[in-house]
Image (cartoon, grey):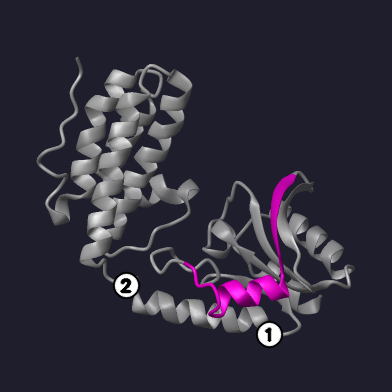
Amino acid sequence: MPHAEAAIADLPVGANHKKALLAVARDLARDRHVLAVAITGSISRGCPDPKDIDLVVLTRGSRYGTRRRMYRGERVHMLTRGIERFLASHLGTRSRPFTLRPPLADAVILWDHEQVFAHSRARARRRLARGPRRATAAEVARLRAELVEALDDLQTCSSDRLAFSILATDYIARCGEVYLRLRGAWIPPRKNLLAELDASAPELAKLCRRALSHLVEPKAVMRLARGLAETALAPVGGLTEEYEVRWD
């Protein structure tokens, strides 16, 4: 715990967040199955006023799950991974897609008895320094086909408002991800996607927000949908010429 307390004291967050982190760290330290704990998310990236606290907890065996609890009035989201699953997914057996920003690259490790998080963080930072791999011609074709098919799905379900809202939300987010992918940027978690677009593509972020604000108006969304796809696919020539959105 001394190392954990020192690491928490150095974080650029308020006193209440630090008290919440200390409380959850002490709870976890009493669990003999817990091997390592790391802070991830916005706190690890230096956010002074995070909406919640994200932790990754490494345990013995093959546990897998998430827990959400309140500590000192702060929301704590704990992602629990058994060491067997963690080693399989992070150290080569099942690798993460290389376009997603490595989640452990910014991790603040509270304790790590087996040095598993330390090795994974070093590996993530090496990946981050190299940058995401370039999109292949096959991937470009797949991304274009994916957006074209999504547009068709939106049009065919436009009379079902609930289904349309669900598909449209996913489509808008996917356009943002494709935009970043084709420009050689890391893809953040979806909850951070609009913030990333605000920084790197403010016009596209504005277009996404306009579309999201009209989810209950399918025709309004469809008028914006093609523009989103064309913007996302601009580096590779946009959508295929034969596809058009039509309203009868």
The quarter in which the N terminus is drawn is bottom right
Disc with the residue nearer the chain's start (1 vs 2): 1
Q: Is residue 64 above or below residue 60?
A: above
Q: Is residue 120 magenta?
A: no
Q: Is residue 231 left or right of residue 198?
A: left
Disc 1 packing (10 Å; few <14; some 14–19; many ≥20): few
The quarter in which the C terminus is drawn is top left
The residue that disc 2 covers is 133
**Residue 30 seen by the camera:** yes
Residue at 72% in and 47% down: 74
Residue 241 drawn at (x, y percent): 9, 41
Judging depth in this view, the residue of 14 and 45 nearest the camera is: 45
Q: Are marks 1 and 2 in contact (CB under 8 Å)?
A: no
Residue at 79% in and 65% down: 25
Q: Is residue 231 above or below residue 187?
A: above
Q: Is residue 69 above or below residue 223?
A: below
Q: Which residues are magenta?
A: 74-96
Q: Is residue 82 magenta?
A: yes
Q: Amino acid at mark 2?
A: Arg
Q: Amino acid at mark 1?
A: Gln
The numbered dot on residue 115 is 1
Judging depth in this view, the residue of 227 and 2 nearest the camera is: 227
Q: CA gap, disc 1 to disc 2?
A: 28 Å
